[in-house]
């Protein structure tokens, strides 16, 4: 059972990868790493193809809500 403070994981789907072809694949889900500083600057931090987390412009992604199924 998950504790009340634990947030469910968030994912973003890449909708464009212009300028980031080697790092991002269009239509692929990427785990989101919470970064309030990045968010306040119009950026999103995701774990990309390198396996590391980097910030990218928000416009490259759409956020997906993931729900648990039974």
Image: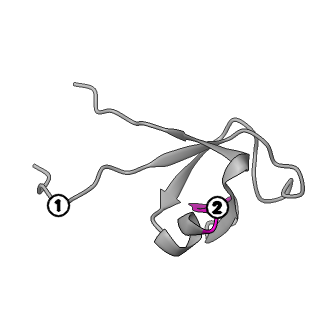
Task: Assess disc 2: are there few (<14), some (14-19) or many (≥20) residues with their C-alpha within 10 Å of its C-alpha.
Answer: few
For the view shown, which residue lies furthest in the top direction?
Answer: 70
Secondary element under disc 1, as helix, strand or loop, is loop
Task: Pinpoint residue 31: horizontal percent, then vertical percent.
Answer: 51, 54
Q: Nearer the viewer, mark 2 or mark 1?
A: 2
Most common SS among magenta residues: strand
Q: Nearer the viewer, residue 66 or 37?
A: 37
Residue at image point 53% right, 74% down: 37
Disc assigned to residue 42: 2
Residue at image point 43% right, 49% down: 10
Relative placement, left or right, of 56 versus 39 is right
Secondary element under disc 2, as helix, strand or loop, is loop
Task: Pinpoint residue 19: horizontal percent, then vertical percent.
Answer: 89, 57
Residue at image point 81% right, 48% down: 17
Residue 19 located within the stretch drawn in magenta: no
Q: Is residue 1 above or below residue 64?
A: below
Task: Pinpoint residue 50: horizontal percent, then vertical percent.
Answer: 69, 66
| Residue bounds of the magenta highlight | 41-48
Residue that label 1 marks: 5
Q: Nearer the viewer, residue 26 or 34?
A: 34
Task: Assess disc 1: are there few (<14), some (14-19) or many (≥20) residues with their C-alpha within 10 Å of its C-alpha.
Answer: few
Q: Is residue 70 above or below residue 66?
A: above
């Amino acid at each position: 059972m998950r504790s009340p403070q634990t947030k469910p994981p968030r994912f973003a789907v890449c909708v464009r990868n212009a300028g980031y072809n080697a790092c991002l694949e269009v239509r692929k889900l990427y785990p989101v790493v919470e970064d309030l500083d990045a968010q306040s600057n119009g950026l999103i931090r995701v774990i990309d193809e390198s396996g590391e987390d980097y910030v990218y412009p928000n416009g490259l992604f759409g956020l997906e809500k993931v729900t648990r199924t039974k």
